[in-house]
Amino acid sequence: MSSREFQLIRLSEAERERALGVLRDGAGSGRLSHDTFMHRMLIVLKARNRVEVAEVIADLPAHDSWLPRLLRRAATRLNAFVSGAPRVSRTVETRTPGLRLPDPGSAAMHIGRSHLADLRLAHDSVSRRHARLCVRDEGWVLEDLGSMNGTHVNGLRIMGPVSVRPGDHVQFGLVSYRLSAG
């Protein structure tokens, strides 16, 4: 079997995941814009062989991707440890700053790194347009706006609009808050 024939073999899920990891690391380190990341991610998800994937990640070095992956793995393990230990989580809860929920009838609160955000978080893990917090008929709703590092409510990553209430823990990238009412 020639090397060209080997490259045209169907792509495995492990290879697809490795390519997506390279893209995530590239976006996380600032080498890819959000739009470029999303475009390339769709190409990798639709790719049928190794050649298509290799073309998408050719300009992104994979050799330096171990550090972000190591940091993510350590943060995940620490989060699992903290959530499994009630004493520690109570300590963390008292140190988590409060975020006041918007009053009924007020405009939506935009959260992000942008100077146009209502709640500006100057942290590298927060996207320019990270999330939106607003009041609807059913109560307060938090929505992720396609951020790179995600929005979490009580430790779970959200993908669409989610109802929140006072006392919930929210996390924008690596920045955490405890929600409180006025």
Image (tube, helix red, strand yellow):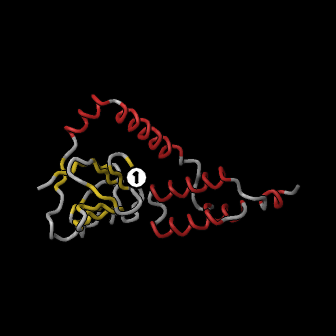
The residue at 26%/48% (across/down) is 168
In the shown orientation, is residue 4 left or right of residue 138? right
Residue on which the image places disc 1: 157
Residue 35, image x and y in percent?
47, 70
Residue 115, image x and y in percent?
24, 67
Count of labels shown?
Answer: 1
The residue at 30%/60% (across/down) is 142
In the shown orientation, is residue 166 left or right of residue 8? left
The residue at 34%/57% (across/down) is 126
In the shown orientation, is residue 101 left or right of residue 13? left
The residue at 67%/61% (across/down) is 54
> Looking at the rendering, in which quadrant would you find the C terminus?
bottom left
Residue 154, image x and y in percent?
32, 46
| Secondary structure at numbered mark 1 | strand
> Looking at the rendering, in which quadrant would you find the N terminus?
bottom right
The answer to which of 113 and 135 lies nearer the viewer is: 135
Residue type at mark 1: give it. Arg
The answer to which of 60 and 10 lies nearer the viewer is: 10
The answer to which of 8 and 122 lies nearer the viewer is: 8
The image quarter containing residue 80 is top left
Residue 106, image x and y in percent?
15, 69
The image quarter containing residue 91 is top left
In the shown orientation, is residue 60 left or right of residue 127? right
